[in-house]
Amino acid sequence: MKKIKSIALLIMMYTGLSAQQNVILPINGKVNKDTGKDEKTLTMDPKSDSRTVYNVTVPSLAIYKPEGAASNGTAVLVVPGGAFHILAYDDEGVKIAKSLAAKGYTAAVLKYRLVKLEGNNPFGKLMENAKNFDTLESIMAPVVPLAIEDGKEAMKYLKSNATALGFNRDRIGVVGFSAGGTIAAAIALDKDVRPLFSAPIYPYLNPLMKTPIPADPPPIFIAVTQDDDFGFDINSAQFYENWKTGKGLAELHIYTKGRHGFANKTQGLPVDRWEDRLMEWLTAMNF
């Protein structure tokens, strides 16, 4: 049974142009029979090539291997955000993965289960729900544990298939944005899927603030802005303090300006170089 399951997990679809490998992940340890037919992708700004994904029911990974650089033996799970309604798939996923791959990392972009949205304007629905953050949280709440489960399943897959994918199974980190930062932090809090490091970027941490810090926690890197649209700087600072109290290594960057969602934006601000700070930290940590 275990062998059949492993074979099923290794079924991959190849896209030659990007040399990426797409892997369907199980749910509750079972291979999905759902075809994911409800999943949709659109580009909301005609001037942009950045895709938004919504109505994900089947979690999956898109794996990018190092290009133009020798592999450093380390992998990074990249988790885009979007308030558990949508995924900023390119801006907080593919572009980050390609940047990491160019530096020698194997990167895997996660699609995780989301709130079901009707109609052809998912961003509009998200903005409507976001007018009252308490309402938004109540809508997100049922899917948050499912998304976290998908993140943990992705880590398990990467560890189980590390040799085949060309990296060390003990050297797998995670970086996540906003809702993806929830998943990145949750993975760091779970001793059973302990990552090499975790980098929650402008993370939504409300669901995790009462979770105990594990013994020997992995290092974390947090970046957020003081003018974050949702006030995520407050919990980020508290999470850093909790990590330090739990005797974990942590680095926290709270930029004065840049607002929420700065991942791939060029704003002429210090926050534009957050990824440089992350890379300096990874280098200093020998990651």
Image (cartoon, helix red, strand yellow):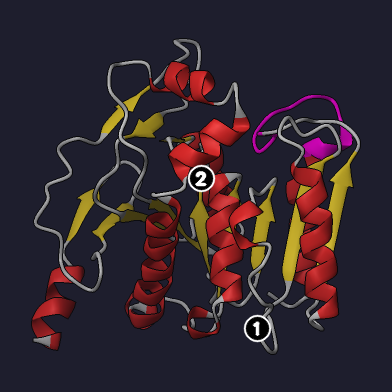
Q: Which residue is mark 2?
A: 80
Q: Position of residue 253 (x, y in %)?
A: 85, 52
Residue at figure coordinates x 51%, y 55% from the top left: 78
Q: Position of residue 196 (x, y in %)?
A: 61, 77
Q: Residue 156 occupies which quadrant of the picture?
A: bottom left
> Is 56 within the magenta?
no
**Amino acid found under the numbered disc labelled 2:** Pro
Residue 50 sits above or below residue 23 on the image: above
Q: Residue 185 occupies which quadrant of the picture?
A: bottom right
Q: Residue 271 occupies which quadrant of the picture?
A: top right
On screen, residue 68 versus residue 185, left or right, reads left
Question: Farthest top residue?
Answer: 46
Residue 73 sits above or below residue 147 on the image: below
The quadrant of the image that shows the C terminus is bottom right
Q: Which residue is mark 1?
A: 214
Label 1: few (<14), some or many (≥20) within 10 Å?
Answer: some
On screen, residue 285 versus residue 255, left or right, reads left
Disc 2 secondary structure class: loop
